Amino acid sequence: MNKCSESYKSLFLTFFKINMVTFGGGYTIVPVIRDEFVNKRGLIDDDDMLDIVAIAQSGPGPMAINTSILTGYSIKGWKGALVCLLASVLPCLIVISLLFYAYDSVSKNSIVKSALGCMSGAISAVLFITVFQMAQKALSKHKIFGSILMISAFAAGYFTNINTIYIIIISGLVGLIIFSLVEEDKIK
């Protein structure tokens, strides 16, 4: 199932670097992986990246690791998924191990606090841009239906106490029902 000539070593090193330097939680890794494998290397297209993100966020486990595994699988099959899993977990283990010994001095350091505060602003901007770009791509095929579903899901999550998992399940079922009953080219 090797779809490309990308070596396992190259895949490992790329994901190791990405996971070692990406701060801010699982969703911050998505724009970095997208930029590397969609824009720079052309190994995955935007539609596949949207699928990877959708599956990664709906499955159990950390988003960063799920995204890495699914990207590795998409590029090199099961072996690629295992390589990316290892490359994603190792940086976490290394950083956590180092922080275990240095936590007291690091947590009270004003420079570290300031740096992390600055990073949160940059991370928010990167996430906004990525969400905007992926939403454009996702809505390019069925603008009206997708917009209504997205706004409804947002409103249900923001203005009610409905658990997010139920919103995701209901949205998925609505899409499944609509696209099962109506021909796809009739949905806008």
Image: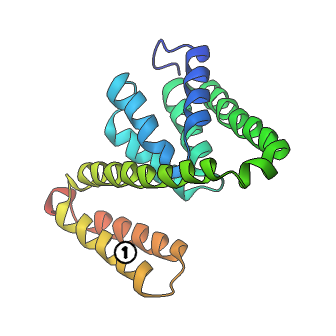
Q: Exactly how many numbered labels are in the figure?
A: 1
Q: Nearer the viewer, residue 88 or 146?
A: 88
At 38% across and 48% down in the image, what residue appears? 126
**Residue linked to disc 1:** 154
Residue 25 appears anywhere in the view: no
Q: Is residue 87 above or below residue 159?
A: above
At 41% across and 42% down in the image, what residue appears? 31
Colour style of the rendered protein structure = rainbow
At 46% across and 53% down in the image, what residue appears? 54
Name the amino acid type tagged 1: Phe
Neighbor class of circle 1 (other Cα within 10 Å; few <14, some 14-19, many 20+) is some
Identify the image quadrant of the C terminus.
Answer: bottom left
Q: State which quadrant residue 155 falls in.
A: bottom left
| Relative to 88, 130 lies left or right | left
x and y percentages locating residue 3 in the rendered image: 46, 20
| Relative to 186, 166 lies left or right | right
| Relative to 178, 84 lies left or right | right
Q: State which quadrant residue 15 falls in.
A: top right
Q: Nearer the viewer, residue 71 or 124?
A: 124
Residue 133 appears anywhere in the view: yes
Residue sitting at the far right: 101
x and y percentages locating residue 93 in the rendered image: 76, 38
Q: Nearer the viewer, residue 95 or 156?
A: 95
Helix, strand or loop status at disc 1: helix
Q: State which quadrant residue 12 falls in.
A: top right
x and y percentages locating residue 180 in the rendered image: 32, 64
